[in-house]
Image (cartoon, rainbow, N blue to C red):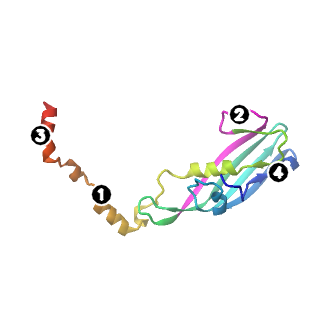
Amino acid sequence: MKKKKQGLLIPFSSLKEGKHQFDYSIDAAFFEQYEQSLVHEAQIDVFVDFEKKRNLMEMDISFNGKIGSICDRCSDPFELEIDGEDYLIVKFGEEESIDEHIIYISDSAYELDLSDQVYQLVNLALPAKIEHEKEEDCDQEMIKKLQEYSISEEKEDKVDPRWEALNKLKNK
């Protein structure tokens, strides 16, 4: 991972116990910090409802915005609207967490960087197949080419005559 340029820091040591809110805007520079990032263009607003308690901190993280992407169906660039939410509990100590919603930080820590958690949250919110919502919004010329070169069911159903004899032997 590259050196972080844009962090989502919460300076919790200077905060009083109670609820606090933090708002961040992240863009392409944020995602450039991660070498394997799937996101290259973005404008996303991140909202953190943070509650500091005596022995731990709780937060609800939500985001919404747009990312620039390429349609998996037609290869046209487009903006994909994305949003999501999650919660996180931060405890003090050196333990390893087995729960994805609980992280441990050092007793001497004075700020919390949410960059990795937000990065993962945004990536998990991406659909498996990124495409225009409606096929009509796709590049119609590309759709025609895809249909021209796709294998239709008719072509699949036709059995090569060289294999017909083998199929007969197999069915006996």
* Label number found at residue 11: 4
Q: CA distance from mark 1 to mark 2?
A: 50 Å
Which SS class for mark 4?
A: loop
The kind of residue tagged 4 is Pro
Viewer-nearest of discs 4 and 3: 3
Between discs 4 and 1, the one toward the N terminus? 4
The kind of residue tagged 2 is Glu
Range of residues picked out in magenta: 79-101
The image quarter containing residue 105 is top right
Instruction: Look at the numbered discs 3 and 2 and tell me whether their residues touch, using CB distance below 8 Å.
Output: no
Q: CA distance from mark 2 to mark 4?
A: 23 Å
Instruction: Look at the numbered discs 2 and 4 and tell me whether their residues touch, using CB distance below 8 Å.
Output: no
Q: What residue is at 58 percent from the left and 51 percent from the top?
A: 123
Which SS class for mark 1?
A: loop
Q: What residue is at 46 percent from the left and 59 percent from the top?
A: 131
- Residue indicated by mark 1: 150
- Residue indicated by mark 2: 96
The kind of residue tagged 3 is Ala
Between discs 3 and 2, the one toward the N terminus? 2
On the rendered image, what quadrant is the C terminus found in?
Answer: top left
Q: Is residue 84 visible?
A: no
Between discs 2 and 4, the one toward the N terminus? 4
Viewer-nearest of discs 1 and 2: 2
Which SS class for mark 3?
A: helix
The kind of residue tagged 1 is Ser
Between discs 4 and 3, the one toward the N terminus? 4
Q: CA distance from mark 3 to mark 1?
A: 28 Å
* Label number found at residue 165: 3
Q: CA distance from mark 4 to mark 3?
A: 76 Å
Viewer-nearest of discs 2 and 4: 2
**Dominant secondary structure of the magenta stretch?**
strand
Asked if 146 appears above or below 120 in the picture, the reply is below
